[in-house]
Amino acid sequence: MTRPFTAAAILLAVMALPTLGDAQTAPVSADAPIAYSSDDVEYVGGTLTLIGRAELIQGQNRLRADRLAGFSQTGDSRMEATGNVYFVTPDQTIRGDRAIYTTGNDTIVVTGDVILTQGQNVATGSRLTYNTRTESARLEGGSNGRVQGVFYPDSTGN
């Protein structure tokens, strides 16, 4: 393995995906290897960029986009995903136009036409801020200035 690819592999290992997802899957995912694929890869100035059908998978969590760029600054790593962004866990799917994940605060911010699904439940807006450690989320209004959604109550009575 050449030096740039070794640096790139280390950079990926430090990146966000280990803690992305809900608390039930985080311990399993955090210990799992990180697999990545794309049509092209660039490594320039400490930034690894996956271009074209870019995908990171760790455990049961998947981050997919047209372009994924990751870099580390003073111990804080950041991953930027652009174009057809999907973040998928066993329980949720988040879709948007752009996402930024920062390891320092365990937060992913998804913007654009955001769609959050969990089972049959769907919520839409223009900006979703989700903390992967605390599982707290904030969804802000979409093109009409409002958050919209459909919630299906549990039919079993639980």
Image: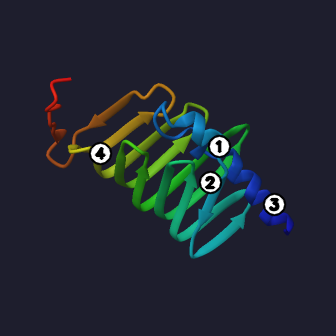
The structure residue drawn at horizontal position 15% and vertical position 24%, both measured from the top left corner, is 157
Characterize the local packing of mark 1: few (<14), some (14-19) or many (20 or more) Cα atoms within 10 angstroms. some
Give the alpha-carbon distance from disc 2 to disc 4, as whole Å: 24 Å
Please state which amino acid type lies under the numbered disc 3: Thr
On screen, residue 63 versus residue 114, left or right, reads right
On screen, residue 154 versus residue 132, left or right, reads left
Question: Quarter of the image containing the N terminus?
Answer: bottom right
Give the alpha-carbon distance from disc 1 to disc 2, as whole Å: 7 Å
Please state which amino acid type lies under the numbered disc 4: Leu
Give the alpha-carbon distance from disc 2 to disc 3, as whole Å: 14 Å
* Pointer 1 with pointer 3, Cβ within 8 A: no
Give the mark nearer the N terminus: 2 vs 3.
3
- Residue 6 vertical position relative to residue 32 in the rendered view, above or below: below
Q: Between 20 and 147, which is closer to the camera in this rendering? A: 20
Tell me the element at label 3.
Answer: helix
Residue 76 image-quadrant placement:
top right
Disc 4 or disc 1, which is closer to the eye? Answer: 4
The structure residue drawn at horizontal position 16% and vertical position 41%, both measured from the top left corner, is 148
Residue reaching furthest to the front: 156
Please state which amino acid type lies under the numbered disc 2: Gly
- Residue 49 vertical position relative to residue 136 in the rendered view, above or below: below
| Residue 77 circle label | 1
Residue assigned mark 4: 116
Residue assigned mark 2: 70
Q: Position of residue 12 (x, y in %)?
A: 68, 53
Q: Position of residue 130 (x, y in %)?
A: 41, 35
Give the mark nearer the N terminus: 1 vs 3.
3
Give the mark nearer the N terminus: 1 vs 2.
2
- Residue 147 vertical position relative to residue 12 in the rendered view, above or below: above
Tell me the element at label 2.
Answer: strand
Characterize the local packing of mark 3: few (<14), some (14-19) or many (20 or more) Cα atoms within 10 angstroms. few
